[in-house]
Amino acid sequence: MKILIIEDQAELLDSIYNALTKENFICEIVETKRKAEYKIYTFDYDILIVDINLPDGSGLDIIKQIKNINSRVGVIIISARNSLNHKIEGLEIGADDYITKPFDMSELIARVKSLIRRRKFSGEER
């Protein structure tokens, strides 16, 4: 599984990267919308982990773009925004899951694995 992590907080970005690579996922990281757009148009990913609030734009725009390119890519939003409207908006544009900051890394890993099961194995363990 190849995962693109889009997060502007360096410490959190490193923590997510380290946690997922320990689980043997192949991860790439970016801190801005512009860098994320370059990556999604250049490389294929199985999952995107996307922060909504980026220094140069909205992660929601990235989700809209990736869904136009590859509707099968899995998307997990991580955000400090915890209002119901933000969650609904993210899910309606194509995100598969929404996790509110702060969160425990074990929860994020469980959600990534769950998304993989739903996408690849119709929900069954393999």
Image (cartoon, rainbow, N blue to C red):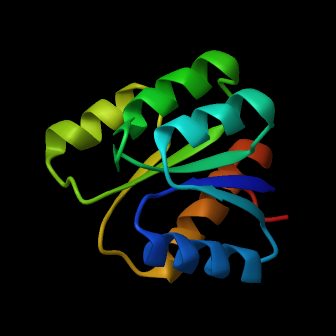
Q: Position of residue 16 (x, y in %)?
A: 56, 73
Q: Is residue 35 left or right of residue 73?
A: left
Q: Residue at x 62, y 42 (%)?
A: 74
Q: Residue at x 43, y 59 (%)?
A: 8
In this rendered view, identify the residue nearer to me: 20 or 14: 14
Q: Is residue 67 left or right of residue 107?
A: right
Q: Residue at x 40, y 67 (%)?
A: 9
Q: Quadrant of residue 68?
A: top right
Q: Position of residue 112 (x, y in %)?
A: 61, 61
Q: Exactly how many numbered labels are in the figure?
A: 0
Vertical placement of 112 versus 44: above or below?
A: below
Q: Residue at x 21, y 53 (%)?
A: 81
Q: Position of residue 17 (x, y in %)?
A: 63, 72
Q: Quadrant of the C terminus?
A: bottom right
Q: Position of residue 66 (x, y in %)?
A: 60, 27
Q: Quadrant of the N terminus?
A: bottom right
Furthest-right residue in this view? 126
Q: Is residue 55 left or right of residue 97?
A: left
Q: Quadrant of residue 25?
A: bottom right
Vertical placement of 15 versus 91: above or below?
A: below
Q: Is residue 42 left or right of residue 99?
A: right
Vertical placement of 58 versus 65: above or below?
A: below
In this rendered view, identify the residue nearer to me: 54 or 105: 54
Vertical placement of 3 versus 120: above or below?
A: below
